Image: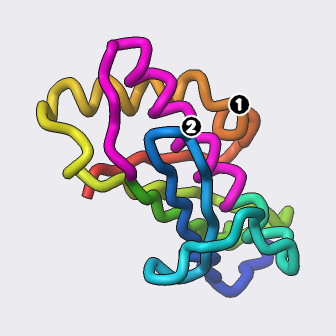
Amino acid sequence: MEIKLKPKTFGPVFIHTDQQRTIRYGRSDDSVDQVAPPTDSPADTLLFSLGACIAISLQMQAEKNEITLDAFQVQVTSKKAEDLPNRFDCFEVLIPRSIFEDSEFAESLLRSAKSICTVSNTLNAEVTLTLI
């Protein structure tokens, strides 16, 4: 007999970064002002870690291509798997399209950032990056 778990979504959490790679964290897009992620929820801590890693990786890949990104904010959500064992099934990281001028280059930059992000490479769940 297969056990089905109730669908559950975690997040969103928000990570803001500027040109100096200063990272700020928050649970709503209008209050991203904490210098450290809130630690009251292990699930949110994981989401904050993934978002920060992607943001820093994007900046690193942009710098490698001699591009300076303006300040930007990413949003991260996840969905819990509906079967056992208890785990996340997927993660979604939303990146504002406005930080890129060329959408073809943007997709390339996203792929290269994901490939160097230690956190996303560590997760077994699917991690999808989407320009919004």
Q: Quadrant of residue 119?
A: top right
Of 127 and 24, the residue lying toward us: 24
Is 111 on the left-hand or right-hand side of 33? left
Residue 27 is a magenta residue: no
Is 127 on the left-hand or right-hand side of 122? left
- Three-letter residue code for mark 1: Thr
Q: Residue at x 60, y 69 (%)?
A: 79
Is 37 on the left-hand or right-hand side of 113? right
Label annotation for residue 118: 1
Magenta residues, start to end: 48-71
Q: State the image coordinates of residue 68 (x, y, percent, origin top left).
A: 33, 29
Q: Looking at the picture, does residue 41 appear above or below residue 104? A: below
Of 84 and 57, the residue lying toward us: 57
Query: Callout 2: 10 Å neighbours few (<14), some, many (20+)?
Result: some
Residue at disc 1, secondary structure:
helix
Label annotation for residue 56: 2
